[in-house]
Each structure stands twice: as structure tokens, then as C-alpha cells.
Amino acid sequence: MASERSQRSQSRRCDEEDERNPQEDGSLRDGATTPPGVETPDYHPRLPTTADPPSPLTPNATSTIEDQAIKSRGAGKHAICIDQGNTEERNRQVQSMAKIYAKASRVVVWLEEATAAGGQVYGKAGTDSDRALEELRIAADGQPRKSLDGETNQQTILLLLQRSWFQRIWVLQEVAAARHILIMCRSAEIDGYAFCSGLNASKLAFQDLDIQSRIRSATYLIKGAIFRPKYATSPSDRFSLNIRPLGELMDMYHNRKANDRRDKVYALLGMSSDDYIPAGLSPDYKILWRDLFHRLVRFLLGKQVSVETWEEKEIAVIKSKGCILGEVSLVKSGGVWNDRQSVDITSKNIPGYLGQKKEWSGRWALHATAKPIRKGDVICLLQGALKPTIIRLYEDYCAVIAIAVTLTDDKRIKGLHINWPNLLRSITIFGCDFLLVWDWEKSWERPGDKEDYECLISSRVPKHAKTELESYLDKAARLRNMGLILGNLEKDEEAEENLRKAINAHDRASGKELSHTLAAMDSLALMCRGRGDLKRANKLGMMTDLLGRRGDYAQTTEKGIIRIAGSFDQEVIKLLLDRREDEAQITEKVVEAAAGNRDSSKELMALLLDQRGTEVKITEEVVKAAAGNGDSGKEMMALFLDQCSNSIIVTPGLVEALAESFDALAMKKLLDQRGTEVKITEEVVKAAAGNRDSGKEMMALFLDQCSNSIIVTPGLVEALAESFDALAMKKLLDQRGTEVKITEDVVKAAAGNGNGKEVMALLLDQRNNSIIVTPGLVKAFADSFDALAMKKLLDQRGTEVKITEEVVKAAAGNRSGKEVMALLLDQRGTEVKITEEVLKAAAANEFAGCEVIKFLHRTVGIKVAAGVIEAAATSGQEQVLRFLDQCNSIGSDKEGWLKISRLYNAAKNGDAAAVRKLVDDGTPPDKQNIRRETPLWIASSYGHKAVVQVLLATDAVDVNVRSMAGQTPLFRAAANGHSEVVKLLLDHGAEQSYTDKDGKSPLSAAQLSHRANVIDILTKHYAQEHRRHGRSSGRE
């Protein structure tokens, strides 16, 4: 055998350029082989492999230092030479390499580097290499490290791993064929499997992920050596080591170095496990690289793809139809040097293929690829391909991360056994147009890279010259296609952005081929609608209608613009203004619609002011629309006042809207800018009174800054007395006192004010002569103010004060009833008549009833009728009942009256269990008190849902009972914001149309109290009832 090799070597040239000779650079330069067909049962050759370029080999050539080192280790140094000038022999020999390697029993990996003179580096470099292997051996053995210089030792390992052996392509076949691998340096050696174990245990990591990837992929082959059979077999006539399918091998090893790019393919053919490799991929050194790369892509992806390649570049541009299978949601590695990774996938766009599941999550175990898989990468299936491809999305193209992925069953998909080949073959719809870039030289580490396709390709390969029009149209097409891909991935915002950019590209191309992008927008809108995102779907539809002049938007009308301004964001209105500039008129109703836009009002208004400011008028209706728009309304009002105050049309209604809904700062700006036009009317003060957040500051602003603009009327004084404090009233009296009249309604208003006592004291002290004394005013005093206020009134205007039965009844029901009643008896005793109606009012007084009854019993004596007992019971006054019982005024019906009283109190306190028990015991559930309030009315007012349910279940209560004020249970629940009770009452026939004495309905009461949930419920219920009655009328 030796002589045969020697004869061959004399006739063939062993080229010293490493990659065109597969035995160079650590491949077979020092390899011992058995030629095909020669049986050598007793011969166990060992293959030392290095990465150093050799001296030209001849029968007498030696490499002294390396030769001595290898021989000192007992490894025979053998050589196979190929005549590089003979293409046919080169083709034939390269095809045989895998079979030749498979004959060896052991491979020695020689990691010493050569000097320029061809010798090995001795001294420190050699010492560092030995130390690195020793460190790895210790790590593999699990021994504790004794070295004090751990960082230095780690650095020596990292330097060792950067040796050129790990970078070359041909060395892969040697280690892939080996059944035993020995890693050697000058004076140290380590078993291949131990080398890999030590690497894992060391937990070292490279900053350069490309280097780390190359080492990891090599260790996958090294550690697998001990598991390989003694004799390699191959399933076909083509000999192969059957490591992995060619597509996976390319994904794992394409970042290896080779002087001849074709060897990046040929070196891996002998390792592929594919049943069939086309003849066009067999080693042929006459073929151009670009043609070989082209054939490789079409072999891996199928003949339906369109491929473009270049001679001196490792880049392919691939165009193909395809579909989205899923998205990577998580990637986990078994360790820095582990060649396996688990990839979590969330499915997309394969409904029906997995039973009835439309979406699933799974985990695939994949080999680590040269280009790391990242979260957010996409799994797609190209038309004609047998395996999925993993890609990374950029603005207008996709980068190939893994060209052909072999999938396995996922045990996490419960109840399903997935036959992936069959499933993939069953897919027939390929709705996406992919532009893929498979670039072996680019890392693709930055998914957020903004480099577009033209920039990428221009920087990498020569391109054909294009006209400006062609460039814009191509750009639009790429953006459009990527937009639909993003849409399939449910990344709708990004998809919309891409289509927007595509439209801009069409604009630069004078609108040519715009219809294609409009069709894509329709498709994205359909996807969004199917996912329930109606807002985005409607927006896309509107933009498409505007761009394509379709449907209602073939012409521009005020109605259409109002709809856009009220329902869409600034992007759509900008599109309208840009595309229909001469047609789009910005009317008051358009501005009003924009101000009421719930999502984008501020942005819309800023756009309108910027582009069409002279047409924008801020009217009362616009301010009201802004007022109903929450926080956006406040920002909008600030925008109006800051940017276009001269466009504000000041009217009483506008000032009223501003007072009701905005803060004092906004009002101050209006007063500063347009103060002479502002009038503070009764309605403005009432509006400010309803402003929970800024009413007090607003009123102070009016009184301090524009008191002369205040139009004093009885209604204004009434509003001030009802809602503001004594300080505000004092300012008004000081500035406009002669115009202030204290009427019955003013007193009633102050009675309902939390600060009413102080307000009334102020009026009595400073304006007693302005008080217009009427029976109603006296009654209001007796009903709502304390004895001190009543005494002042009696002292100052006593001759005008008449003590009627109504006045005494009011005093009996007052919180301070005992004191007021004592005052009246003391000063006007002859006029005070204690009637049954007075006693009823006292007995029903929830705050001081028992005190008043006892006082009257003690001072004037009382005669108790049944009506008085009923008044106490139906108002929950158990103390009054017990006192009357002590006076022997109740008789045998005592227990029944007590139960009625307890029912009232249980309804008020929300004790549903007590209510149920009392009703079950026969207590009447619907008795009215003297104010015509029932237990249902009381429970609804307090929002006690459970009590309301119990009472309604009796079918013995009036759901529309009306109190003395004309208010129903529904009215009370709505005014107090008890939405669940409102629903219950409506479901049981409560009527919305009933109004109270002031003309307020349940809906208007909810609106005055800003009860948004209740307003929504009542409005929807009214609409449903309206439709139902409409259908009924139609049938009749």
C-alpha cells in the first residue's frame, strides 16, 4: 500500500493550497487511508489531522518537527495526494473521501500552529496549548482547580479554540467518520469526548458568537465518535457517513472557511443522510460557484423557487410563494457548548391541519445553527419545499436563518400525533410572497437592523441598473408583500406601517400600480376583522376607499368628512387633506366631530389647526364636544386657548360649557384673552356649581376678576347659595349687594348646601332687610336650619313671620326638631297647633323623632292616632314605637308594627336575610311611609342589590312607586350610580320615562351625577325597547 501511494504521489501534484486539496488544513495531509476495495482486516490506521498548510508532499518529504511530535505519540504519518491539475481525478477522489476516512480507527487532531518557516511554535505558545488541554481534562474529570490564575487559564483555552483547525471545512469529514478521536498539542493530549465534556464543564463563552458556533458544531461531531459503528454503512450506492440531512449540515457548517467555495458543499455531501443527492451536486470542479449554489438552493427548497446567485459571493436571493407556520416564542440552549436547543413555537395560519385546533404551541428539539435562532423568528413553508425554513423579518425582505428544518413530534401537544411530512404535504394554500436572502457571510444578529433590501444587496453584489420608477415600484412591492406576511403573523401595527410605506413608494412612482397595494390593504383589513380588531379593520377600509376613490368616498362630502373626523385617527384625516385638498372643506360640524373623537381628538385638532387653521372655528358646540371627551378634552381646550384664541366664538353657551367641564386655568385664559365678551350668567354659575373638580376655584375667579360681568338674578343667587361656601356669597354681597334678594328659593337652596348654615347666617347678618318673607321661606327655615337661625329670623322680621301648620310640621321633621319646636312654643306658642300631621312628621323623623315625641308628650300632651303609629313604623322608628307602647298608645298590634319597622331598617341596611324572613312571616313588603317611599324604593336608593332581588321576587311590590318628590326606585338607583340595581329594575319593568317634580328622568339624573355606567345601561335599554316596539308596530 505504501508503494502504491508513493507511486501515485510521484505522478500527482499535492497542492499546498489547503482547501482545494481535501487532505490539507487538517483533513488528510497526514492521514492514513485504505484505497477503495482493498481489504485490510489487520490494519487500523490512525489519522493525525492538523490545520496547518503543509509543505508539498513527495515520497521523501518530511515535516520534521510535526513529524517527530506525531511519531512520538505513536501515530503513523500517512499522506494522500491529489493531482490538482487533473479535474477528473479531483472530482473522483473528493467523492471518495468519506469512504476513505471511514476506514480509519482513530483520528488525531493536532492543534499546534505552524510558523512561517513551517515549524511548530515552541516555548510559551506550546506551554499555553498544553495548559489549555490540561485545564479541559481537569474540568472533564470534575476535579477542583488548584490554579490561582484561573483567568489566565481560561484565556489559554479561548486562544486554543481559536486555532484554525476549528475554522476549516474538510476536517469535519474526518471527525464525522472517526470512532475514536485524540486531541493533541506538543506534549499534551486528551480524548475527544473528554475534550467536549471539559468544554461544557468550563462554562466559557466567546464574545464572538460566530467562533463559538463553529466550535460547538465541531464538538457535536467529536463527542459522537464513540457511538459510531465499527464499519460505516450507507443506504445507497453513494457512500455517506449519514450524519444529518444536507440542509441541516449547511445550516450548521456554512460559516466554515474554504479557499474554494465549492468545497463548502462538497465536504458536506459525504456526511449527508439524504436518500437522494442529484448528480448536479456531485463534486465537479468545472462548474462555477454561482451555479453550484443555485443548484443547492433548488435541491433544498424545490424547483418552484426563483434563485439568483453570484460568482464571488456566498449569497443567494430567493423568491417564492409560501405560508406562515408559526413564530418562535422561546429558545433555550442546553449550555454554551451544547449543540442542541429547544425551540418553542406558537402556531399561526394552519387552521384545520391539527384536528379542530386553530392555534397550538409546541417545542422542537433542533441542532444549533450557525446563525442562532432568536425569539420572533418565523417558521414558513415555501411552495415546493419538503421542510420548513426559519427566517428573520426585516423591513422589506427576510433573512434565512435555517434553510431546511427537520421536525419531530412534540409530546407537549396533548392528544395529537403529528406526522410532519404528511402535514406539510397537505398544505396547498401559499398566500405569501417571500423575498429571502441566504447570506453565509452576514451574522444577522440584529433583528432591528434598518438596512433595507436595496442597501443590503448594493453593499454585497453588483446589481443591474434600474430606472427610478422601477426602483420605487420594486420597493412598494417588497413592502406590500412584507406587510401581508406581518399580517399573517398578527403583527397588525407593523403590517399597517409597511403598507403605509408602500403607498409612499407608489406616490414617488406617480401612483402607478397602486391597486396592488390597495388589494393588500383590503386583505389586511379582512385579517383584522377576523381577529376582532374592528377599529383597525375599519381604518384600513377607510384609507383604501380614500386612496381608491371607492364607494361613499368617490366624491368628498361634508357627511363623509364628519364621519372620518369623528371615528378615525389623524393619519386618515391627513390622508384626506393631502389627497383631496381642494375638495375637503373644514366646517363647524367637522371640527365638532373631531373634538368629540374619543381616541385621537387632540392629535386631530392639532393637525387641522396646522394645515387648515384659518377654517377652524371654535364654537359652543365644539367646546361641548371637547368637554365630553375626558382628559383629551382638557388638552384640546388648552390647545384652542394657546393656538387659536381669536377663532373662539364667545357665547353664553360656550362660557357655560367651559365653566362646567374645564378647570379654572382654562377659564382664566379665556378671561385674559377675551374678557370683555364674557358674561357670567345664572347658567354659568350653575354650570360651575356642577364642576366637581374646579367649581369653587372657578367661582372665586369670576368674583375676583370679573365681578362686573356677573349678571345678578334670583336664580344666580340661588345657585350660589346652593353650591358654594359663605366666602363666595360674602364676595357677591360685598361687590353687588344691592342687587341681591333673599327669596324662598334661595333659602331652600342654602338648605341643601353642606355649607348652608354658614351661608344662611351670613345672609341674616348682612342682608336681613333683603329677605323676602313668605310662608314658604319660613317653612324652609323651620325644615332645614337650627333654632339659632330661626330665632334670628323671628327677632329681625317677627311681625312678618306666620306660624302655620306647615311650618310646625317642618319643624317636627327637622334634625334639630326638639330645639326648633321649643323655640316656636316659647315665642309663638299661641300659634303652634300640634295636629296629627305634625305628630306624623315627628314620628317619621329619622334623626330626632323620639326626642320630639317625648318633648311634645311632656310639654303639651299628645293624642296618638293610628296614622302616627304607621308613620313611625314605615320610617323604621322602633324607638318611637316602644315609647308609644309605654304610653299604652299602640295596643295589640305592637308586634306587627315592629315588624314593619324592622323591614324598613333591614332594607335600608342591606340585610337581605332579614328582609326575606320578615316577608316570609307575612310582613307587607310594599307599605309607603309619609314621603311615599317603600322598602324597594329605600333599598334601590342605597344600592342594596340582594334586598332588591328579594323584594322583586315577591311579585307584591310596585316597581314604579313614586315618592312625594316624584322619584321612582329606578330614578334613585340611577342618580346614585347603582348600575346592578338599575339592570334589575329594568328587567322587572321599571319605566324610564317617569320624571320627578323638577322634570328630571332617571337618565338625566345619571347624567347630572356623571354616572357613566348607568348612562350606558339606560341608553342601550332604551334603544332595545325602541327597536322592539318598532318591530311590534310593524307587525301590527
Image (cartoon, rainbow, N blue to C red):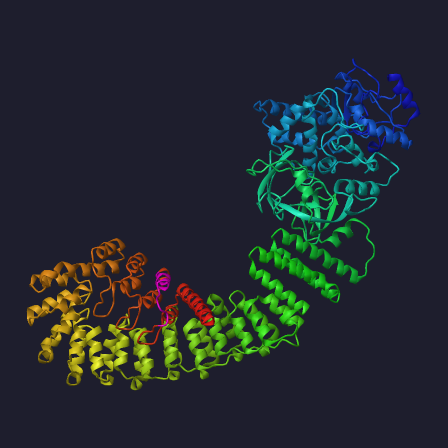
Let me know if residue 813 is in the magenta part.
no
Observer-nearest of 231 and 606:
231
In the rendering, at what x and y percent does residue 258 appear? 79, 36
- Residue that extends furthest to the top in the rendered view of this protein: 42
In the rendering, at what x and y percent does residue 1024 appear? 44, 66
Report the magenta residues as a range: 981-993
Locate residue 922 relative to residue 221 in the image: left or right: left
Observer-nearest of 212 and 854:
854
Observer-nearest of 797 and 566:
566
Observer-nearest of 936 and 477:
936
Q: Where is 498 relative to 782, above or below?
A: above
Q: Splitting the image into 4 quarters, where does residue 1009 fall? A: bottom left
Residue 671 appears in view: no
- Residue that extends furthest to the right in the rendered view of this protein: 11
Q: Quadrant of the N terminus?
A: top right
How many labels sit on residues? Answer: 0
Q: Where is 737 relative to 544, above or below?
A: below
Residue 245 appears in view: yes
Q: Residue at x 30, y 58 (%)?
A: 953
